[in-house]
Amino acid sequence: MVSITIVTWNSAHYLAECFAALSSQDYRDLEVVIVDNASEDGTRALLREVETKWRVIYNEKNVGFAAGQNQAIRASRSNYVLCLNPDVMLSPNFVSKLVAESEGHFDAGVFCGKLLRWDPTALKGHGFQPCRPTPQSTPLGAEGEVPQGLKPASLTNLNDTPEGVPLQGHMLQKPSRTEAEPHKTSVIDSTGIYFTPNMRHLDRGAEEIDRGQYDRPQYVFGASGAAAFFRRSFIDDVSVEGEFFDEEFFAFREDADLAWRAQLMGWKCLYVPNAVAWHVRRVTPERRKDLPLIINWHSAKNRFLMRGKNASGWLCWRLFLPVASRDLMTFGYAVVRDRRLWSAVTYWWKARDSIRRKRAIIQSRRRVSDRDLLWWFSNTPRAIDTE
C-alpha cells in the first residue's frame, strides 16, 4: 500500500484536477490522507465530497505545511508515503513507477519523479514562458554535454495547408501533449534539488525545456517537497524528536532541510524520470521580490535554521567565502530594503536552544563524512548514474 498525504490551505483552485489524477492512478492500493489548515476559500466544501473514500482531517488553525504533513503521515498506515502538494497533477503511472524503482534500489529512502510546470492560465489562452536556457553541465557518469539554449518548438497549426492545395490527401501531424493539453507544459519544474557552495538550494533543471536531458535514473541530493516518495523505514530513521519535517520551519525549505539530514544519515535519493507530474510553481528565486512577506520571512528564517542543524564547522570553513558573501547580502537586504525581514534573519538566536538540541541528535547519527558531503555543493547540479 502507498499512502498519499496532502496538506491544503486555500487550495480550491487546484483540487479538481489534483483529485482526478489521484483517482486515475494505475496503482490501486492507495490510501489518501488530507489535512486542511483552516482553509477559507471553498476548499473544505470540495473536501467534504471525498470524505467517503479518503480520510480528511480539519485543523482549526493553519499549523503550517511541515506540521500538517507530519500529522498526515502519522495518520497513514502504509510502508510508502507520497507527500504531495495540492497543486500537483500526477500522470496515471506516477505511483507505480516509483514503487517499481523502490523495489530495485533498497539503498534509497527517497524517490522523486520528473516535475514539469502545470500552467492553469494556459487554459485561458495565456501561455507559460520559461526564462532559463539549458545550462552547460555534465552529470557524473554521463558522456557528452547537454545541448544549450534550447527553445520551445512552435506549435503546429493543423488548419493551415499550402495555398491552393486541398486538405484531403495530406497527413496531419498528431498534436503533441502540450498542444492537446496546454496547461501541461514541457518546462521543467524539478528533477531533484541540489545545493550550491553558498548553501543555497535550487531545483535541478528548473525553467529548462524538457528535451530528454534528464531522462536517466540518477541519484540526486534530494527531492522537491511538491511530490516526494518515502519509505516508511526512512521516515522512522531520520525523524528527530518525533518530527519528520521540522515543524519550526512552518513552510518553505523543509524539503531541503530533510534532504541534507538524509544525506548526513547515509540515505540516497533516486530520481525516476519516467514518473512524470505537473506542478504549479509559485515560489522561484526570480519572483522573490513579488512574493508576499510571509513567504520571504519564513524562507529567510529557515535558511539559518537548516544550516544550524546540519552544517558542521569544517563544512562552513571550507565554504566560508560563498556563504559569507550571501549572508552579507541577506542581512544587508533586511537592513536597507526591508526591515520587516530583520526578525527572520535573527530568528536563529531566539531558537538557539532547539537548534543546539536537534543538531546534537542529527550529528550523533550521521554516517557520511564532511569530505564526501562537500562534493554535492556545486554551482552546477551533480548527480550519480545508477549504473
Image (tube, grey):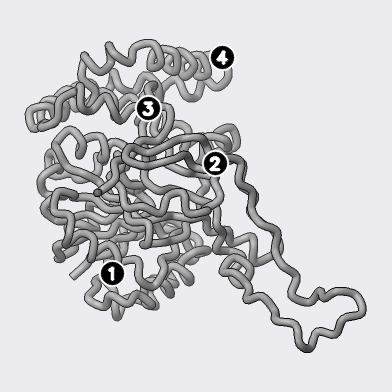
Which of 312/359 is in front?
312
Residue at 34 percent of width and 23 percent of height: 347
Label 1, secondary structure: give it: helix
Question: Where in the figure is residue 85, as x and y percent of width and height?
Answer: 39, 56
Which of 14/205 is in front?
205
In the rendering, which numbered label is found on residue 336?
4
Label 2, secondary structure: give it: loop
Residue at 74 percent of width and 75 percent of height: 158
Q: Eyeballing the image, is 359 above or below 111?
A: above
Residue that protrudes farthest toward the left in the picture? 364
Q: CA distance from mark 4 to mark 1?
A: 50 Å
Q: CA distance from mark 2 to mark 1?
A: 29 Å
Q: Residues within 10 Å of mark 1 (few under 14, many from 20)?
A: some
Question: Is tag 3's residue or tag 4's residue first in the polypeptide sequence?
Answer: 4
Residue type indicated by callout 2: Thr
Is residue 187 in view from this perspective?
yes
- Residue 185, image quadrant: bottom right
Label 4, secondary structure: give it: helix
Residue type indicated by callout 1: Ser
Residue named by callout 3: 378
Residue that protrudes farthest toward the right in the picture? 164
Question: Is tag 2's residue or tag 4's residue first in the polypeptide sequence?
Answer: 2
In the rendering, which numbered label is found on residue 96?
1
Q: Residues within 10 Å of mark 3 (few under 14, many from 20)?
A: some
Q: Is residue 264 left or right of residue 161?
A: left
Which of 22/334 is in front?
22
